Image: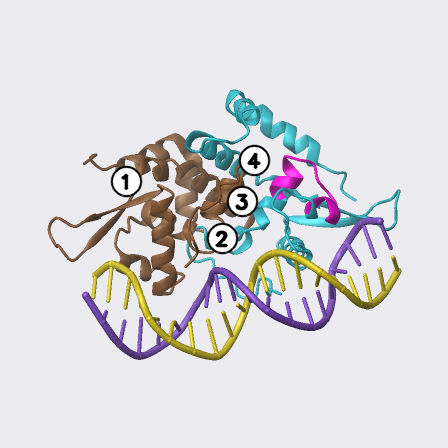
Chain colours: A cyan, B brown, C purple, D yellow
Amino acid sequence: MRKANTKRRSGCPLNASVEMLGDRWSLLVIRDMMLLGRRTFKEFLGSYERPATNVLADRLRRLAAYGIIRTERDPTDGRKLIYQLTPKGIDLAPVLTELVLWAGRHEKTENRALIRLMQKDKEKFLAQIRQRCEQPRK
Amino acid sequence: MRKANTKRRSGCPLNASVEMLGDRWSLLVIRDMMLLGRRTFKEFLGSYERPATNVLADRLRRLAAYGIIRTERDPTDGRKLIYQLTPKGIDLAPVLTELVLWAGRHEKTENRALIRLMQKDKEKFLAQIRQRCEQPRK
DNA sequence: CAGGATCCGTTTCGATACTG
DNA sequence: CAGTATCGAAACGGATCCTG
């Protein structure tokens, strides 16, 4: 669909980041993994914003190509694929946190409980995410 | 172009943020304002990634509709329009910072000097941005 | 049945030309 | 200078179909 990562013009800060994350879906997939613990294609499909299957497949492919997520077959159910954040993906947690906090400061209806947790102890929150998402190196 | 902000479904964290910032250009405009001090249509046009005029106009309109930037006529040159970050826009600085730091950790060719500055004293860096972008309330 | 791929009508993008 | 108008190209989204 969108061809991933042909020219990597990183001459300016944020250029590369926006290339990887600057679209309607990529950050939402990462949110689903990081905050909601989702891991399969079907779970992402059921996300709040309802991506189309082809778009979702494209975004998962792109995120994998950028090394932000990776895929693995479910050991207990051969049909299922598990998508996981890589260390690089987990490392996006501070970005996500700041974005949620920003929205919490300026928009009315975000998830207040989550925001309070983030505000109260940012470091602890990040540690939780890292622990939840970390997987044994295969 | 894109109709701004009709339905505001913020039932899920990041939903609103992505609606405002989740595209190829919005964050880059904010970067140009925040990090590079750009303030006019022409200056944004000359940005590293070269937006088309219509897309740029659309994004500026959207960002203004979301209260992230605002516009003001140049007092010294009536033809010029000055775009400025609102307090809400300035408040995106931590998000931008984390994103640049993330890219710095995982991509090769970002601006190392800027990253070192950010790492060394994040708070001081944020204070600098706030000062540079703050404008007298009219 | 899970994870997509394909088709297709609609929306958005982006380059260029043009206007107030 | 700061945009709008136009138009072909690309991306989107929904439905459906395919494959292990």
Distance from label 1 to label 4 (Cα)?
31 Å
Going by the numbered disc 3, the residue's amino acid type is Arg
Distance from label 2 to label 4 (Cα)?
25 Å
Residue at 66 percent of width and 35 percent of height: A36
* Label 2 Cα neighbours within 10 Å, binned few <14 / some 14-19 / many ≥20: some
| Of pointers 1 and 4, the one earlier in the residue sequence | 4
Distance from label 3 to label 1 (Cα)?
27 Å
Distance from label 2 to label 3 (Cα)?
15 Å
Label 1 resides on the chain identified as B
Going by the numbered disc 4, the residue's amino acid type is Gly
Is circle 1 on the same chain as circle 2? Answer: no
Residue that badge 2 annotates: A18
Residue B81, percent across and down? 21, 53
Viewer-proximal residue among A64 and B114: A64
Q: Are marks 3 and 1 in contact (CB under 8 Å)?
A: no
* Label 1 Cα neighbours within 10 Å, binned few <14 / some 14-19 / many ≥20: some
Q: Is residue B53 left or right of residue A104?
A: left
Q: Which residues are magenta?
A: A30-44
Q: Is residue B121 visible?
A: no
Distance from label 4 to label 3 (Cα)?
32 Å
Dividing the picture into quarters, in which one does residue C17 lie? bottom left
Q: Is residue B65 left or right of residue A84?
A: left
Residue A135, percent across and down? 74, 38
- Give the numbered dot on residue B11: 4
Distance from label 1 to label 2 (Cα)?
22 Å
| Of pointers 4 and 3, the one earlier in the residue sequence | 4
Residue at 35 percent of width and 41 percent of height: B67
